Image (cartoon, rainbow, N blue to C red):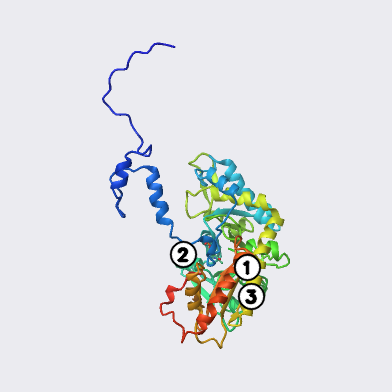
Amino acid sequence: MPLQKAAQRDERPMSVNPFVGAANPVGDMTGAPPRHRMPDGPMAPSTAYQLVHDELMLDGNARLNLATFVTTWMEREAGVLMAECRDKNMIDKDEYPRTAELERRCVSILADLWHAPDPSAVVGCSTTGSSEACMLAGMAMKRRWRRRTPARDARPNLVMGVNVQVCWDKFCTFWEVEPRQVPMEGERFHIDPEAAVALCDENTIGVVGVLGSTFDGSYEPVADLCAALDGLQERTGLDIPVHVDGASGAMVAPFLDEDLVWDFRLPRVASVNTSGHKYGLVYPGVGWALWRNADALPEELVFRVNYLGGEMPTFALNFSRPGAQVVAQYYTFLRLGREGYRAVQQAARDVATGLAARIESLGDFRLLTRGDQLPVFAFTTAPEVKAYDVFDVSRRMREHGWLVPAYTFPANRQDLSVLRVVCRNGFSEDLADVFAEDLTRLLPDLRRQPHPLTEDRNAATGFHH
Ligand SMILES: *Cc1c(COP(=O)(O)O)cnc(C)c1O
């Protein structure tokens, strides 16, 4: 071992990363950090962890949240993979070519699942969710319309049911497209093909079909919509594309409703989106947008990013994004396969239809849907129920920890208020039993009310997207 000479004394302190070690445990006990300003100095990681952890303790229990469509449970292995990938940026396709490859495989899997006649012609990408995917699909439709419309002062419009998710209102506002919405009528709570066609003209960039509606879980009649637009084309020559917003249903119908024709089997369907983080069974946020072929996605919208190494075509609103969710999507495809997805979605549908029937049998409620399309159903109080309303039910069920949204329908059924239950993987038959028992136990109390009591309707769970 070589003999070392003592180093010359250096007064400079070592450089210490403030993240390293418990800097001053006593200080952490006494110095309460300000709430809305950055603290002056660091604190120990264990202290910071405890503070943030405690702050979050009073968040709702995600598994009892029957309002959301978004995945609240994944297996441990998926969590491990996601943790392994949390440092990978999806946009760095050249640095992380295998992550990019898994994204490409997911697009191929979805193209196959959605019956693209020529899967090799399909172009598609991952997104942060369906909202971004819908923006991209809307932009492609708008650009295609602009190409075929020489009049510079023409104003584009988009036709849809009034029941569309709020992302379509956003799209129309952000990209200055006039929304033309088919209202609800009577017991029809989503689009009507003929009414949609009646709203179309030469400036219609496309028609949106929703699979299925967030308001009641019903599938819109996409094939009938396409047929009605075929008729329009025969009469007028107008060739209007359809985009299917399959945020939930595009990951349910391929497994449970194989005979339902709603996807690329219909030549008029130009593009489809889904939320990987809904019935795709991945934690938030991942979505997918696929176009039938390159014609459906104008080339000038695709950016060729080359300053990170390779040259990669991208179509996205944002740039940096985690790769973990895409990896988790591929993992889930691989892990479950078609049979596995079918089993998971069938279990959710069984829970939904079973719970819907049980709620109907209580006698106080009228079902609008039965959970046999999306595993989602909406119900309202029976006409003879005057003592309480859906907002009371939502508020009282919240006392038992259940989040069940109550909300009023849009035009022309503003008179109708409903409760909605979303059954997801993880909401088991057993939990559904507890839910039904809690609701049953509440009824005598509710029936004794002199009249509906929820003055502040926002106090009930209004969230329903
Ligand atoms: C949830 C949903 C959206 C928005 O999807 P995100 O993934 O939450 O952005 C759009 N359309 C429909 C029909 C939905 O259910």
- Is residue 411 shown to the viewer in this render? no
Residue 316 screen position, x and y as percent: 51, 54
Q: Is residue 444 left or right of residue 239?
A: left
User: Gap between marks 2 and 1, in whole Å?
Assistant: 33 Å
Q: Which residue is labeled 2 in the image?
A: 175
Nearer mark to the viewer, of 3 and 2: 3
- Is residue 153 shown to the viewer in this render? yes
Q: Amino acid at mark 1?
A: Pro
Mark number displayed over residue 358? 3
Mark 3 or mark 2, which has the lower sequence index?
Answer: 2
Please state which of residues 437 and 141 is positioned toward the viewer in this rendering: 437
Q: Amino acid at mark 2?
A: Trp
Residue 260 screen position, x and y as percent: 70, 68
- Tag 2's secondary structure? loop
Density class for disc 1 (Cα within 10 Å; few <14, some 14-19, many ≥20) is many
User: Gap between marks 3 and 2, in whole Å?
Assistant: 45 Å
Please state which of residues 90 and 420 is positioned toward the viewer in this rendering: 420
User: Gap between marks 1 and 3, in whole Å?
Assistant: 15 Å
- Which quarter of the figure is the N terminus placed in? top left
Residue 344 screen position, x and y as percent: 66, 59
